[in-house]
Amino acid sequence: MEEMEVPTEHLQEKIHEEAEEKMREAKERWTLYVALSTAFMAVLAAIAGLLSGHHVNEALIEQIKSSDQWNFYQSKSIKSEIAGSTARILQFLPGKPPVEENKDAVARYEKEKEAIRQKAEEDEKNSEKHLNIHVTLSKAVTIFQIAIAVSAISILTRKKGLWYGGLMLTIAGIVFLFMGIFA
């Protein structure tokens, strides 16, 4: 009986082609994951950037409010000084002019100044708080941008280790993002 001859060359080629196709699919799947994670990083960077911008604007507004309050405080100080000087001058004039009115005005101005000072200091603290949050969120944006760049380099160099590094940076960026959000 004659043995059947099976053309192994064709079979071997087919197996090789199938294996190469599977490897290509695995590589494409990996690049798909990198692309998706990079898009996710970009979204997080955009969110952190918007929040950072919001807080720097709020810091600026609070600083302007504080400056306005300090100007108001200075205005009351000047009025108080004028009323006090007027009272001192009037007490030496003959005929007993109404000195008490000026003394009352000085006391009123001093009381008003205290409330204004407290408001100005509160606005300064709010400004500092917003500025600190802005700095934290800016760190998150920077880390996300670096993660995106590292992920892009991983695609170009075909090194998964760089992509994993980009993912680790993303986790660090998320930490800063949450620190800014919940500050």
Image (cartoon, rainbow, N blue to C red):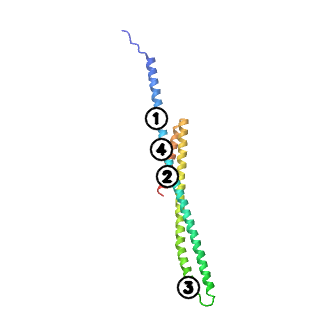
Q: Position of residue 64 (x, y in %)?
A: 56, 63
User: Judging from the image, what secondary structure is the residue with disc 1 in?
Assistant: helix
The three-letter amino acid code for the residue at tag 3 is Glu
Mark 4 highlights which residue? 40
Q: Which mark, residue 166? A: none
Q: Position of residue 49 (x, y in %)?
A: 52, 50
Q: Is residue 7 above or below residue 152?
A: above
User: Judging from the image, what secondary structure is the residue with disc 2 in?
Assistant: helix
Marks 4 and 1: in contact by CB < 8 Å? Answer: no
The three-letter amino acid code for the residue at tag 4 is Phe
- x 59%, y 80%: residue: 83
Q: Position of residue 155 (x, y in %)?
A: 53, 37
- x 52%, y 57%: residue: 55
Mark 1 highlights which residue? 29
Label 3 to label 1: alpha-carbon separation? 87 Å
Q: Residue furthest left?
A: 1
